Image (cartoon, rainbow, N blue to C red):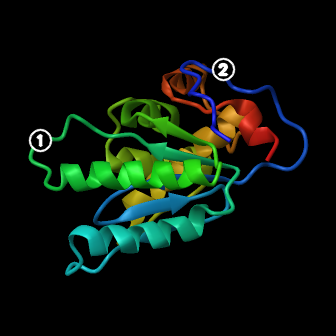
Amino acid sequence: MTLPLFEAEAPAAPAAAGPRPLVIGGDLSLRCTGIGSAEWTDYIKPKATLRGHPRLAFLMQEIGSYLKSADLVVLEGPSFGHAGQGGHEELAGLRVMVQHWLWRREIPYAIVPPSSLKLFFAGYGKASKAQMRAAAEQTFGRTFQGPGANDECDGFALAAIGCEWLGFPLAEVSPVQREALAGVQWPDREAVTRS
């Protein structure tokens, strides 16, 4: 079965009833991938000696172990504004590999542009990592510290925007913040709610 194409400007669902679907956010990275849901966060950091195919294989195995039971996966899209980053081709490959892995397992996924994620979570489309962590604490009651703090925060933020779209908000956000949902490539809502 093939999933339908993305809905470009899907509005948020009305307040939902019943149990909250398992929404997992993924901030994919070659160095430190942040993964999170409404209840937990973690990070995946490959050994510095892993490069190329072995690193991708390690990341796919670890990422897949978190995503395999998800009802919806929310991934951060690429950021085209950062010059001088190495590994663009390999990172693009990781994104495609994860999306294909999800597609093969019929797990719906969304792609969130970084500016939409920042607008939703911190109220500002160019929020810094520190502003994202501050929003996590002030608005969502979550504190992130340690080596994967920024990545875990992004993973949680991605799960939060997915929960908001499904009608299971994790915190009250402003109407301006909710406008960020229109910039996300959402899957067909029925594909999420029927799983």
Q: What residue sits 90% from the left and 39% below the top?
A: 17
Q: Which residue is mark 2?
A: 11
- Between 70 and 132, the one lying in front of the other is 70
Q: Is residue 79 visible?
A: yes
Q: Give residue 186's quadrant in the image.
A: top right
Q: Which residue is mark 1?
A: 83
Q: Amino acid type of disc 1? A: Ala
Q: What residue sits 44% from the left and 30% below the top?
A: 116
Q: Is residue 137 visible?
A: no
Q: What residue sits 69% from the left and 25% below the top?
A: 12
- Indicate whether 26 appears above or below 120: below
- Circles 2, 1 touching at the beta carbon (< 8 Å): no
Q: How many numbered callouts? A: 2
Judged left or right of residue 23, residue 20 is: right
Q: Position of residue 167 (x, y in %)?
A: 75, 34
Q: Give residue 80's quadrant in the image.
A: top left
Q: Give residue 171's quadrant in the image.
A: top right
Q: Amino acid type of disc 2? A: Pro
